[in-house]
Image (cartoon, grey):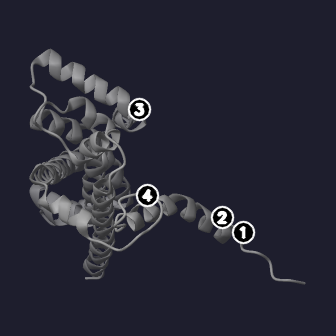
Amino acid sequence: MGKKRNWPAIYLSIMFVILYAPIFYLMFYSFNSGGTMYGFEGFTFDYYLEVFQNTRLLIIVLNTVIIALLSAVISTIIGVFGAMAIMYVKKQQTKNTLLSLNNVLIVSPDVIIGASFLILFTFIGIKLGFASVLIAHIAFSVPIVVLMVLPKLQEMSPTLIDAARDLGASRMDILTKIILPYITPGIYAGFFMALTYSLDDFAVTFFVTGNGFSTLSVEIYSLARQGISMEINALSTLIFLVTLSLVAGYYFISKKAVGMAGMGVRK
């Protein structure tokens, strides 16, 4: 009898090809000296130089990074305490209600979220720009952080907290020396997920940006409407590489955090 074919591996290979082939096609032609998406004529870095020489684009990159970092940090802090509030609430009905409210922003279409924020900011008089984008990014990032942190809280044995209380630990000691170190992998996961969601978001950002302020996703959309440009390919390639490095960084940091947590438990 012949060897059985590994259908799951074949299926995954086909899916990866479908997902990544367009990205690698875009990256390949970002080096095309011919300036088109067909007929590779020669290798050049000119379009990457154009990206770095474009002052307006560099300012937009800086805006995007600042928004992503600020929203990730603030949403991680809010999400961690939100997850603890959901975890340690006494009534199950209240817990289910809070979880349902938390998941609304995740399951809702981005267009609806963006339009809702636009109406809200217009109604309360917040000028569209940096502040509106930051608030919107924090809002849709918090539920993601909660979902990343909550499983780690559920894994933690209640006896750890009970033992700490029996030994005279204060609430602050329990929080800083027991709970936070244990859920560190979930905190890292929530932070990096919030960071990547903020960097990649287009739909919500498109609604809440104002004149004079933009992010990379909105800028790429604007450039793409003007026609095919190798500068877009170069910029998209750089974004993909940065996102890939963030994923790799999250993997190594979370792996290290899990190892340190394991050592702490053994001690």
Q: Secondary structure at mark 3?
A: loop
Q: Quadrant of the image for the N terminus? A: bottom right
Q: In this rendering, which labeled residue sits more in front, label 2 or label 4?
A: 4
Residue type at mark 2? Tyr
Would residue 183 be visible to someone looking at this image?
no
Q: Which residue is mark 2?
A: 11
Picture quadrant where residue 236 is located: bottom left
Tag 2–tag 1 contact (CB < 8 Å): yes
Q: Which mark is residue 37?
A: 4
Residue type at mark 3? Pro
Residue type at mark 4? Met
Tag 4–tag 3 contact (CB < 8 Å): no
Q: Quadrant of the image for the C terminus? A: bottom left
Residue type at mark 1? Trp
Is the residue marked by circle 2 packed among few (<14), some (14-19), or many (20+) residues within 10 Å? few
Q: Which residue is mark 1?
A: 7
Q: Which residue is mark 3?
A: 109
Q: Secondary structure at mark 1?
A: helix
Please determine whether, in this image, residue 45 is positioned above or below residue 36.
Answer: below
- The answer to whether 95 appears left or right of 49 in the picture is right
The residue lying furthest to the top in this view is 123
Q: In this rendering, which labeled residue sits more in front, label 4 or label 3?
A: 4
